[in-house]
Image (spheres, grey):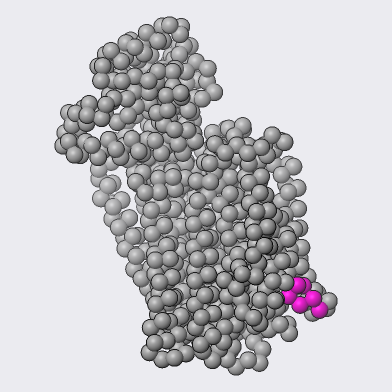
Amino acid sequence: MEQTNQNHILGEEKISKLLVKFSIPCILSLLISALYNIVDQIFVGNSELGYLGNAATGIVFPILIIAQAFAWCIGDGCAAYLSICQGKKDTQNAHRCIGTGITVTLILSVIMLVLCAMWREPLLRLFGASDQTVGMAVDYFIIVLCFLPAFMLMNMMNAVIRADGSPAVSMASMSLGAILNIILDPVFIFVFKWGIAGAAWATVIGQTVSFIVSTLYFFKTKSFHLKKASFVPQFKIFNNALKLGASSFITQMSIVVISLVCNIMLAKYGSLSIYGQDIPISVISIETKVFTIVINIVVGIVLGGQPILGYNIGAGKMNRVRDTYRMILTATLAVGIVSTLVFEICPQVIINIFGSGNNALYTEYAQRTFRIFLSLVIFTCVIKMSSIFFQAVGKPVMAVVASLTRDIVCFVPLVILIPYVCEINQAGSGINGILFAAPAADLIGMIVAVSLTMHYFRTWEAGESNIPLPVSAGIRPSRKGVIVTIAREHGSCGKRIGQLVAEQIGVACYYKEMTALAAQESGLAQRFISDINENSPELLRSLYLSTNVVQQAITAQEQIIRKIADNGSCVIVGRAADYVLNEYTDVIRVFIYAPREYRIKRVMEMYGDTMDEGRKNIARSDAARAAYYRNISGRTWGEPHGYHLCIDSSCGVDAAANIICDYINQKI
């Protein structure tokens, strides 16, 4: 009932009201998270350490992003898996997945701690540390490194806490740590005179307090309960969570790649210029933190719109999808315009927050960086918004293309090429050439993002007129008895065999009816649920199946399969029903296969395909079914040990149906 009411709200409530309701908590949470990385640089920059201290903390930042990438991947994946388990009312697998996530995060954090401690100086020099900054960077890094397990576990746990229905606790945990960091930074840096070590201690104390608050929550969770056995790794279950968290990992690691390449170029061309190596790295580290604030606001807006977009795309309410997109785009453009005006008109105001010092070269390069490097920040905002939008509507390939085109495909080569060309033409100009890589990448990325968006909406409109009338269905009365589930290769006549079995034993056969029932139950469109495998892209299938909108459809479908099974004896064709009914004892699991040539011939007869079309359609359909089955079960589709019967249907559909019926009679 609660889920039905939530769906009704997402499908009927005023969009602007929903967007405000969902986006504001997301924005606040992301901004609080960003404070951890910004506060240190503000106080360090205003201390006697100046821009060299900022350069040192900026060098450590990408390494912490790597740690955060793993933590968010595991945390977001476990959170998404918990949401799926809540929809299925699955109380068994949720705690195992989360317990495994905590164990894996702890192990990874210890491995990272040891490796980074062993190679700390070479690693910091790789990220741009100079002779002047490497000592400070090591001092800061060692302290932060010692508390890396608490940092990673805190990030992992907070994602799960939000999914458990307690976003206020997650925000309180992060806020308390950030406030402590803000209070302790000036005390340790200016009063105790601990320098950069003081900034590190303020950060880790704040993170540790956040970790403790998050840990305490796990003793009073709402939808799952951890036991000692929960922490024993269950990798079959955990594998599903990793797929669900893959997009978070990709996003964070792209930031690392950008930071690494950019810092290497800044160090190289900075040393050939009047600014030296440290001024450019210090300035870019400040620019990155300010840029993060802007992007986090945009990300918060779009994340708030995700549930609205996800539900309405699944429900086929395209007008609401368009309206939501327009409102998100308008808000994104507003953030981008305001940011651009600030960076172009008064960059010194922003720079002074991080300590201006008395270095004229530092001030000169900082102003130039904000005005050139961030000149098209409005395009960056739209690109990021578009990437998350595509993820929300179940288009992960478009999401990855939109994101990586700007960050990896364009920016990384341009930040190498442009300064090289500038340096050849005029010695010492390469350091300024680096600044033009960002707007150039933004322009290309914007063109790609807009093109993808236009293609997406045009494709949807073209497909709307082809949507067939929904199939009306209901769960038919039945008697107690066996439930036959039939999984089948494309072209093996599994559906027809299932119908024949149902006729012989006198029960109902469910195929398309399941999607109609799931649509009635969830409010999603029947066509959308039915075509999950048809819409599954050949690339990034796991990411597609992990999107919120597809998971809603999968959950609705699984709930209906259980309702059908609870009603009594029947035959269920497809939709991984053999796994969905895994805990039911009266299920006979059948897999129908046939030689490829036989199946090609059948597909040609049934659908009018040519031989080449039939071969391609069989390969695509089987791959999509295998991916779907693997996504929800962690098992291999068609693995003989998972079924009671595996039948080669080339013996004939009647013969195959008779084999199944004979087996049923023996079981009874």
User: As rendered, which of 8 and 232 lies closer to the eye?
Assistant: 232
- 515 versus 260 height, above or below: above
Q: In which quarter of the image is residue 118?
A: bottom right
Quarter containing the N terminus: top right
- 113 versus 141 height, above or below: above
Judge whether residue 182 can be spotted in this image. Answer: no
Residue at the right extreme?
192
Q: Quadrant of residue 604?
A: top left
Q: Give the range drawn in magenta.
A: 193-199
Q: Does the magenta stretch include residue 144?
A: no
> x, y (%) of residue 635?
47, 33
> x, y (%) of residue 378?
45, 73
User: As rendered, which of 500 and 99 lies closer to the eye?
Assistant: 99
Q: Is residue 196 magenta?
A: yes
State the residue at coordinates (29%, 25%): 594
Judge whether residue 131 can be spotted in this image. Answer: yes
